[in-house]
Image: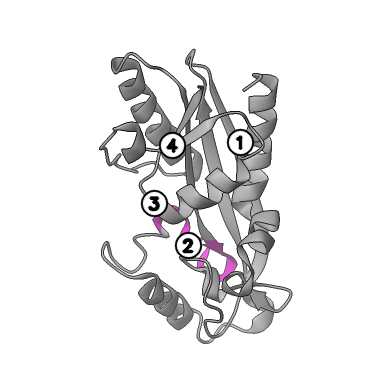
Amino acid sequence: MRRLILATNNQNKLREIREMLESTSLTVLGQKEAGIDLEVEENGTTFAENAALKAKAIYALSVQQGNPCYVLADDSGLCVDALNGAPGVYSHRFAGEDATDAQRCEKLLSLLAKVPAEQRGAHFACAMCLIAPDGRQFSVEGRVEGIIGYVPHGENGFGYDPVFEIDGRSFAEFTAEEKNAVSHRRRALEKVVALLTEQNA
């Protein structure tokens, strides 16, 4: 059994990525499922740097355990044009370390309260770092364009999904299948799957 450890404790992210990697022959495990209890400090200045920090830390532990395997880490966030790309790498901490998703959305909407529709462009970005069992490292990115709405809509998804809109619908109004088909994470994962296919994983 070949394993891939996903460098996250986020159950929503684990579920999404596990669904998207069903086409591979790998068994996808979250950190805790792999017996790894670690919170990596994400102090990089870009999504790619943060993804690499997490992947390298988890890979090093898998080597120490004597069972090096594939490790995949991602860092993603929302970049808003009118805020010069913010919240960006600070998306999770945008409204404070312990803020809820609703509080993050509320802060974002308050900052954009006077911004007209034509200036509310935004994109979700996702950077992924894949490390193979032999230590080779690969980096990929994906993004999806949209706008920031005026009020939250929808009950699905997580994070900024209720305020990020494509064609008049928020990500939180998409079904899981609809979101997985177009998301920034999907676009990055398609590149990861291609890399894994090349590795015969």
> Looking at the image, which is closer to me, 143 or 130?
130
Q: Few, some or many C-alpha atoms within 10 Å of disc 1 (few <14, some 14-19, many ≥20)?
A: some
* Residue 57 vertical position relative to residue 64 in the rendered view, above or below: below
According to the image, label 4 marks what residue?
29
User: Which of marks 2 and 4 precedes in the sequence?
Assistant: 4
Q: Residue furthest front?
A: 1
Q: Is residue 49 visible?
A: no
Which residue is at 49% across, 68% downward?
Answer: 160
Number of the front mark, 3 or 2? 3
Chosen colour scheme: one colour
Q: Quadrant of residue 141?
A: top right
Amino acid residing under circle 2:
Ala
Q: Which residue is mark 3?
A: 10
Residue at coordinates 64% horizontally, 55% vertically from top-left? Answer: 180
Type of amino acid under label 1: Val
| CA distance separating discs 4 and 2 | 31 Å
Of label 2 and label 1, which has the lower sequence position?
2
Which one is nearer the viewer's eye here, 48 or 10?
10
Q: Are marks 1 and 3 in contact (CB under 8 Å)?
A: no
Above or below: residue 82 compared with residue 110: above
- The residue indicated by pointer 2 is 86
Query: What is the CA distance from the residue labelled 1 to the residue labelled 3?
Result: 20 Å
Q: Which numbered circle lies on residue 140?
A: 1
Q: Which image quarter: residue 103? A: bottom left
Q: Is residue 85 magenta?
A: yes
Secondary structure of the residue carrying tag 3 is loop
Query: Tag 3: Cα neighbours inside 10 Å, few (<14), some, or many (≥20)?
Result: few
Name the quarter where the C terminus is drawn.
Answer: top right
Q: Amino acid at mark 4?
A: Leu
